[in-house]
Image (cartoon, helix red, strand yellow):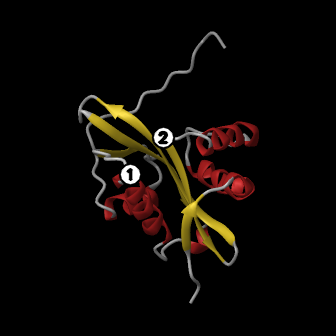
Amino acid sequence: MVTVRIRQARTTDLEYLLGLLQVLFSIEEDFHFEATRQRRGLEMMLDRDGAVILVAEAESRVIGMCSGQLMVSTAEGGFSLLVEDVVVEEEWRGRGVGTALLKALEDWAGERDILRFQLLADRSNKAGLRFYHNQTWQDTKLVCLCKHPTDR
């Protein structure tokens, strides 16, 4: 049996993380993979106190990742955690890797008094939605809207 270890990501993991984001963005219709942009985003998260990237490592390589960022929630009167980029290599799915990553993220958040977790998921990603529902995530009546600045 192969041991899977969950740990915080390091800058030396960037190439693995970019590969995983490419897999994830191939599933999500709203995002397109652009290595330069994604590298910049990953580097920003690695350097930010209120953010974390966790990786699952097996056989001396990164096989999955998830990330989260702290946000202030006026509804909760405290911090919420925006969970992003949950992805596991296809051959490792169904083995508890995603569950372990989210559990480790919950542990990280627990040390910071997080009152709510939230995430966005692609409506067409049926397998991903099933996974989140099995992890006791609940649908809300909220929708995500997006706008990019027009002056750039």
Q: Residues within 10 Å of mark 2 (few under 14, many from 20)?
A: few
Image height of 79 relative to 67, above or below: above
Q: Are marks 2 and 1 in contact (CB under 8 Å)?
A: no
Residue bearing mark 2: 50
Label 2: element kind: loop
In which quadrant is the C terminus drawn? top right
Q: Position of residue 135 (x, y in %)?
A: 33, 63
Q: Residues within 10 Å of mark 1 (few under 14, many from 20)?
A: many
Q: Position of residue 35 (x, y in %)?
A: 74, 43
The single residue placed furthest to the top in the displayed view is 151
Choose between 47 and 23: the one closer to the eye. Answer: 47
Q: Position of residue 105 (x, y in %)?
A: 43, 57
Choose between 49 and 92: the one closer to the eye. Answer: 49
In which quadrant is the N terminus drawn? bottom right
Image height of 129 relative to 96, above or below: above
Mark 2 belongs to which amino acid? Gly
Tag on residue 78? none
Residue bearing mark 1: 109
Indicate the quadrant where residue 55 lies: bottom right
Choose between 90 and 76: the one closer to the eye. Answer: 76
Tell me the residue at 43%/60% (across/down): 102
Q: Position of residue 81 (x, y in %)?
A: 39, 43
> How many labels were placed on the picture?
2
Q: CA distance from mark 2 to mark 1?
A: 10 Å
Tell me the residue at 61%/74% (across/down): 91
Indicate the quadrant where residue 40 lies: top right
Label 1: element kind: helix
As drawn, is 16 to the left or to the right of 136? right
Q: Earlier in the sequence, mark 2 or mark 1?
A: 2
Mark 1 belongs to which amino acid? Ala
